[in-house]
Image: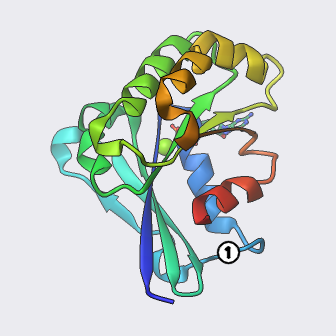
Amino acid sequence: MPDTEIEILVLGLSESGKSALLKRIKEYRGGKAEVADEIHDSVVFLPPTVGMEYEMLAGVKKGKASWRVREVGSSLRQVWHRFYEHANKVIYVLDMSNIVSLGSATVAFSRLLSEEMLSGKPILLLLNKMDCEYSLSKTEVLTRMRIDWYSSRGSGSRLTIMESSLLFGSIESIVNWMVV
Ligand SMILES: Nc1nc2c(ncn2[C@@H]2O[C@H](COP(=O)(O)OP(=O)(O)O)[C@@H](O)[C@H]2O)c(=O)[nH]1
Ligand SMILES: [Mg+2]
């Protein structure tokens, strides 16, 4: 089997759970994949002009293939596009418990779907914090986001939607999506 490295970009508004996902991936053992020590825990700092924001990396390895998972902070939203070209897949994390930010989260997500450099690339919409008492249901979130509308515009086949609790739930289905 040839060596392959798949780059997965983790995007989403601030506090949605991106770092929680990377932390869970770093701790992940079992299932179909195991954590790759060599790309485990590397943190790359961006130039100081963008303040304290950084990208975080986590890795998963299976045989000779590896998956590099990169979180880019939401305050860098203006430069997300720089990471699009090299990304093979995107995970967009959305906080189901934050009704106030749902509108802006939807706008950012719809921009991703129509992004030329991401065209045809698989996107996982992760509806996170399903454990929170005041979270909307999946159906409510998708209705408010008008996801059927996006799907009907041709992105349905590359769009996967999952609910998650990155604090309490299993991430097995997320890892399986990553390594398919
Ligand atoms: N209840 C709950 N809290 C979560 C979940 N995922 C993340 N959080 C919390 O939400 C906050 C923001 O998470 P973080 O991963 O730092 O968000 P980021 O800004 O997108 O990287 C932290 O306090 C996390 O512990 C979840 O699934 N459920
Ligand atoms: Mg973070």
Residue beneath label 1, please?
Answer: 33
Local packing at callout 1 (Cα closer than 10 Å; few below 14, some 14-19, many 20+) is: many
Which amino acid, by three-letter code, is at mark 1? Ala
Is 42 drawn above or below residue 63 in the view shown? above
**Quadrant position of the C terminus in the picture:** bottom right
| Quarter assignment of residue 52 | top left
Task: Tell me the residue at 54%/81% (across/down).
Answer: 37
52 in relation to 4, above or below = above
Residue at (53, 43) in percent of width and height:
158
Q: Return the x and y of residue 73 as percentages of the image width and height.
A: 39, 40
Query: In which of the image's four quarters is ligand 1 placed?
Result: top right
At numbered mark 1, what does the secondary structure look like: helix, strand or loop?
loop
Residue at 56%, 40% in the rendered image = 157
* In the depicted structure, whether residue 41 falls above or below residue 165: below
Q: Which percent across, then down, holds residue 146?
A: 58, 14
- The image shows residue 31 at horizontal and vertical percentages of 77, 71
Question: Horizontally, is 117 left or right of 25 in the view?
Answer: left
Residue 136 visible in the displayed image: no
Place of residue 32 in the rendered image (x, y in percent of width and height, measured from the top left): 72, 73
